Amino acid sequence: KLALDIAATQPRFSICTMVTDLPMYQQMLASFQQAGFVEPDCEFLWVDNSQSNVADAYTAIRRFLFEAQGQYIILCHQDILLNQDRLPQLEQCIAELDQLDPQWGLLGNAGGVRLGKIVHRVSDPHGGNLNSGNFPHRVQALDENFILLKRSANPGISSDLTGFHMYGLDLCLQAEIRGYHAYVVDFHLTHLGRGTRDVSFYQQRD
C-alpha cells in the first residue's frame, strides 16, 4: 500500500533548469504551463546561478537526479520555449518509444548520430522548423537544450567531470554502459540560444 500511495502522489515530470537569467526562466516556465505541464503532474526544480555559479552542470544534474520525484526528468535550458508542440505530443513520443525500444533511456529534440551527422526537430537562430531525420532516430549524443531521462533507466552522470559542456554526451554514454539507448524524437520547440563554443568547450571536449 505504501508503494501505491507513493505512486499516486509522484509527479509524472520533473522539469530541471540551471538559471542565470530569472526573467528568461519565468518566460520558459510560462511556456511549459501553457503547453500543459502543470502541477501536480509536474514539478519544477532549479539551481539559482543568477548571482554567481553556485553549481556547474555536472553538480546541478547530480542534485536534480537526487531530488527529482518524477517518472521522467527533463533537463532543459532556460532559453527554450514550448510554443510549438505541447504535452500530448511528448506523451505520444514516449509511447512510441516504449513500443519501438523498451530499452530507451533518454530522448531529446536534437543529437548526433555519428561524427558529422546531426538530426534535429527544433526552431532556433540557425533556422525555423528544422526537421531532419526519420523520427524517432537513435543517436549517440543529445543536445543539452532539452533532454528527457527515464527514471526507471537509473540515469547517472560522471562524478569526475566539471563545467557546462558535454553533459548530454556523458548522460548518453552512461546510459549506454547500462544497456539503454538515446533517441531524437518529433517534439518541436523553440531554442532561443545559439550555443557557446568558448575555450572551456574545447578543453572539456579534449
Image (spheres, helix red, strand yellow):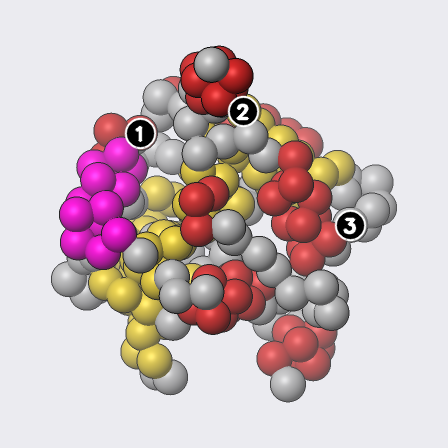
Q: Quadrant of residue 12?
A: top left
Q: CA distance from mark 1 to mark 3?
A: 29 Å
Q: Residue at x 37, y 84 (%)?
A: 115
Q: CA distance from mark 2 to mark 1?
A: 14 Å
- Which dot, 2 or 1, sits closer to the camera? 2
Q: How many marks?
A: 3
Q: Residue at x 35, y 62 (%)?
A: 181
Residue beneath disc 3: 55
| Main secondary structure type of the part rendered in magenta | helix
Question: Horizontal and vertical percent for residue 94?
Answer: 27, 42
Question: Horizontal and vertical percent for residue 110?
Answer: 36, 59
User: Which residue type does callout 1 highlight?
Assistant: Leu
Residue beneath disc 2: 43
Instruction: Between residue 63 and residue 49, name the one nearer to us.
Output: 63
SS class of the residue under badge 1? helix
Q: Give the numbered dot on residue 176.
A: none
- 10, above or below 102, in the image: above
Label 1 neighbourhood size at 10 Å, few (<14), some (14-19), many (20+)?
some
- 26, above or below 162, in the image: above
Decide which of tag 2 and tag 1 comes sooner along the chain: 2
Does residue 164 appear left or right of residue 13 in this picture?
right
Q: Give the numbered dot on residue 87.
A: 1
Q: Specify whether residue 99 is painted magenta.
A: yes
Q: Specify whether residue 143 is painted magenta.
A: no
User: Which residue type does callout 3 highlight?
Assistant: Ala
The quadrant of the picture occupied by the C terminus is bottom right
Q: Which residues are magenta?
A: 90-102
Decide which of tag 1 and tag 3 comes sooner along the chain: 3
